[in-house]
Amino acid sequence: MLYPRFFFALILLGFLSGCDLQQQESPKPTQVAKQGAHLERVKKAGFIRVLTRYDSTTYYEGSDDFSGLEYDLVTLFAQHLGVKAEFILPDTFADVLQQTAAGEVDFAAAGISITKEREKTLLFAPSYQKISEQLIFRSGTKQPKKISDLKKGILEVVKGTSHEQTLLTLKAKHKDLQWQTNENIDTDGLLYLVNERLIDYTIADSTQVQLMRRFYPKLNVGFNINPARHLAWAFQKSEDLSLYHEATAFFKKIKKDKTLAQLIERHYGHTRNIKYVGNCTFQLHYQSRLPRYQELFQQAALKYDMDWRLLAAISYQESHWNPRAVSPTGVKGLMMLTRATAKQMGVKKRTDPKESIFGGALYFKQRIKTIPARISEPDRTWFALASYNIGFGHLEDARIITQSLGKNPDKWMDVKHSLPLLTKKKWYSKTKHGYARGREPVIYVNNIRSYLDLLLWQTSDLKTGEAGAMLSKP
């Protein structure tokens, strides 16, 4: 059985490490004759073997393909080497560390935090992200604010993780500190147990909490249990450091050209947008409203070749799945079409659910086609959504501004910072289409990305407890 994932969330702003990260001094090889053999062996074989783990922050199977920050980084590194990536998922997190130290794989990319204890047996590449370990509790429970508050209640962590090491360190000063370790489920699973009131507390990395609180909005952070730590890939301590040095050069490159920042934005840039009340309202509407229209979303998505959940997320942002919704400006229906757009899409009655959904799907498909072909996914979709909200002309103005600022007009991460400038005369006076409420499309896109994540989570087999079968794939 592979690494167990009973309560895993799909698709899921990280803490970008920046230039001031604490980095290890690269060890120098002791036998020059052997140097380069590892890298050449990988290139000759045509693949790299990488240990990872199923997690919303690392590696998971999304709606169309695998995803996760570690998955994206390793895939890019493999492309950099001209090889393919082979992902291996051990039974436990402790196995990840042990097998890496033993040299059974090329390296591990599993959201591993750098600790002094681990540095004794492992060699860490440059850090790519900064996290905090946080004490998690559920609403309705008194907030713990310090270690001594944990005397009452069950605290449980995953065996072999840095969270267990943190508690062992704290116990030297807090003799009464007690906890349980679990080697059968991971931190996502323990967060589920806290949400269900089956345990009182657990410890999780801040990035993981950031993602999972969208699915379990009643989870709360008690306090940061230790100073911030850095995440990095782990390599075996070896005389041949050729692959390690190549990874070091790779991270230097993707930090400089902003690829790393773009990946972190892709996975975390929208995750703080939906607040507790909005999340609970969504859950209510998911149960009471969506079932009436889900088949129509699926039919329209099939016709226009898109994920029905993206279409449903757009509709929720527009109308909260209310077919009689009307805005002060006169847009109506599930997809909130203007009179002019409805006429263009052949929609005769905007409040008719079927006409609205199919008209909205066609209009969004047209928005996708207007985006320059060189812009790849997922930025292409985010740009199409922005143009759905603000219009293609204003989006182009923002992209031109982005380019004038020396940033990338083909990346949503950069353009979303330029859109709000369309409210300032200094900038909109120089554009073709003039003033626009540029903050709105940024909020609009972030909301839809969050609703899409929630829909993917709600409709996944993983949520219904069928993770064992799905996640035992090789």
Image (spheres, rainbow, N blue to C red):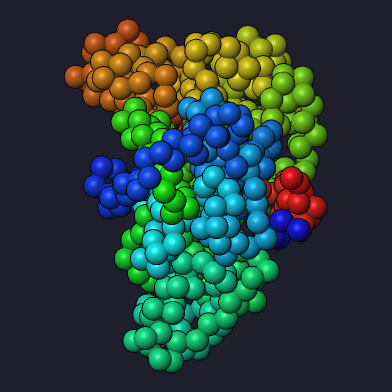
Quadrant in the picture for residue 99:
bottom right
Is residue 31 in view from this perspective?
A: yes
On screen, 383 above or below 128?
Answer: above
Q: Nearer the viewer, residue 362 or 411?
A: 411
Q: How many marks?
A: 0
- Image coordinates of residue 436 in percent, x first then y, are 35, 21
In the displayed structure image, the side of residue 345 where residue 168 appears, left or right: left
Is residue 382 in view from this perspective?
A: no
On screen, 304 above or below 151?
Answer: above
Q: Nearer the viewer, residue 447 or 413?
A: 413
Residue at image location 55% in from the left, 34% down from the top: 42
- Image coordinates of residue 388 in percent, x first then y, are 52, 21
Q: Nearer the viewer, residue 12 or 111?
A: 111
- Image coordinates of residue 380 in percent, x first then y, are 52, 21
Quadrant in the picture for residue 378:
top right
Residue at image location 63% in from the left, 39% down from the top: 86
- Image coordinates of residue 301 in percent, x first then y, are 73, 25
In the displayed structure image, the side of residue 99 where residue 135 appears, left or right: left
Quadrant in the picture for residue 247:
top left
Q: Where is the C terminus found, in terms of image quarters? A: top right
In the displayed structure image, the side of residue 99 where residue 412 appears, left or right: left
Give the residue furthest to the left: 426
Residue at image location 32% in from the left, 66% down from the top: 227
